[in-house]
Amino acid sequence: MLSLKLTESALMEEFATSLERLTRLRMKGHELDMQVVAEAVQDKKNLELLKDMDCDSVQGYYIERLMPAKNLIPWIQHKLFFINLLVQFELLWHQKYD
């Protein structure tokens, strides 16, 4: 699948202009059946904005800092452990309160 990356330079421009440009880029990417990937996500505010814009994927320091390849598998295992706990908690919650 082709992907369209929204880079840091696009995110760093004047907010209103950037938002308009990012919206147009995202729309064009989806029109062309491309996956839209936002790069350089630095904080929760950026992440929420990009989620509201229907970006398909994000990457940046807010998600995780750069790491050596040897640390990737343990990082994924750690994240999956907590995701599994949350899913189990939600299932128990629904069993008890639904």
Image (cartoon, grey):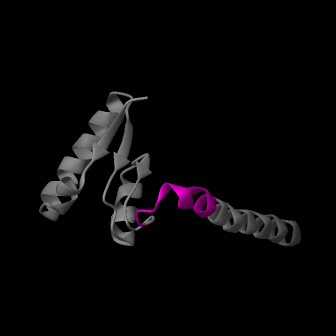
Q: For residue 73: magenta?
A: yes
- Report the magenta residues as a range: 65-76
Residue at figure coordinates x 43%, y 49% from the top left: 57
Above/below status of 83 relative to 25: below
Q: Position of residue 35 (x, y in %)?
A: 40, 37
Q: Position of residue 9 (x, y in %)?
A: 17, 55
Quadrant where the C terminus is found in the figure: bottom right
Task: From the viewer's side, name the closer residue of 24 and 97.
Answer: 24
Tell me: 95 left or right of 9: right
Above/below status of 44 relative to 22: below
Q: Position of residue 71 (x, y in %)?
A: 55, 61
Q: Position of residue 73 (x, y in %)?
A: 61, 56
Task: From the viewer's side, name the closer residue of 46 and 23.
Answer: 46
Above/below status of 87 relative to 37: below
Residue at figure coordinates x 74%, y 68% from the top left: 85
Residue at figure coordinates x 30%, y 59% from the top left: 40
Tell me: 95 left or right of 74: right
Instruction: State the residue lying farthest toward the right.
Output: 96
Q: How many marks?
A: 0
Q: Give residue 36's quadrant in the image.
A: top left
Dominant secondary structure (helix, strand or loop) of the stretch shown in magenta: helix
Residue at figure coordinates x 17%, y 63% from the top left: 15
Quadrant where the N terminus is found in the figure: top left
